[in-house]
Image: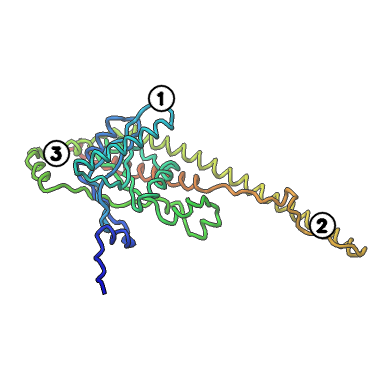
Amino acid sequence: MAEKAPLSFAQIAASEEVATPLRVVQIDGLVVLKIIKHCKDFMPALVTGQLLGLDIGSVLEVTNCFPFPSRGGEEEEEIEADGANYQLEMMRCLREVNVDNNTVGWYQSTYMGSYQTAELIETFLNYQENIKRCVCIIYDPQRSGQGVLALKALKLTDPFMDLFRNQNFTGEKLREQNLTWQDIFQEIPVKISNSALVSAIMTELETDSPATQSDFDRLVLSTNPFIEKNLEFLIECMDDLSMEQQRFQYYYRNLSRQQAQQQAWLQKRRTENMSRRALGEEPLPEEDPNNPIFKPLVEPSRLDGYLITNQISNYCSQINGFSGQSFIKMYMMDAVHEN
């Protein structure tokens, strides 16, 4: 009997189900610098780019990236076609020079943390059609100017992805899945790594100064612009959430009115049937599909409300964290002046 030929690495990888959850996104330091430079050079415009790397067990390694071209004044279809061609050409060139060209996600810039939109979810869906585990790196240049590296890795939760594919965001389905507004995005811890050679070079280039530019940025006392913008965006989100609530109130008012009309119609039909039975006639059916009052009302989707609530929570967290740091700096400066 002939022995079975051993499987190749590619066949084993294709046959095995990846059950290990994603726990860490490991990014090379050079990739972080590329993302920061691209986002800062095009401020205040928002930019995106491709992430390349390897998916190994519970770690997603990001080893390279390249920016997407940004063009204005062109048709949307032309921009999408040019972007796809540019992406394929870049991947081919990287493959020719033996650089990692496996797509593991994308990065994008944001302004004051306003990234939780339906467009981001649609992009996740497009990527996950071909990539089982992909992430989105969000970088906020405005927040990073305050002395904090505002870089985070996000992915969508599996229960939310299932609901979004079916476009079924009714209250009943959300209660069945026990899905809240906090269960849309999952933040993955980010680990920045450098090779031994890069670490040695950085040690050589490190100055003898006890403080760096980021340390000085943390001491900036001007907090008004950042907090004002956050409060403006927070007020806009509260207005949007109020509009969503009014939309649901209108739906429930119409639903109550329809149910009252249905009950009145059924009572009238039952009274009529009692009279027909007394006369020995056949009773009429108690349901009339052609009657407009029996047409079910479409419940509005709760997705927009969930995204707005997520964004409100993000703004509140930013205001809370930044205000706490500002108070510490104010008390510190007060003590310095006293001395």
- From the viewer's perspective, is 306 left or right of 319? right
Instruction: Kindly identify the residue that appears in the image at 35 percent across and 43 percent down.
Output: 318
Label 3 SS: loop
C-alpha gap between disc 1 and disc 2: 62 Å
Percent position of residue 2, x then y: 25, 71
Residue on which disc 2 sits: 269
Badge number at residue 73: 1
Residues 99 and 229: in front is: 99
Nearer the N terminus, badge 3 or badge 1? 1
Judge depth for marks 3 and 1 and give the one in front. 1
Q: Residues within 10 Å of mark 3 (few under 14, many from 20)?
A: few
Residue 211: mark: 3
Specify the farthest residue to the top: 73
**Element type at marker 1?**
loop
For the N terminus, give its image quadrant. bottom left
Residue 44: quarter of image: top left
Label 2: how many Cα within 10 Å (few below 14, some 14–19, many 20+): some
Residue 89 lies left or right of residue 284; in this view the side is left
Q: Is residue 205 above or below residue 183?
A: above
Do we see residue 117 in this rendering? Answer: yes
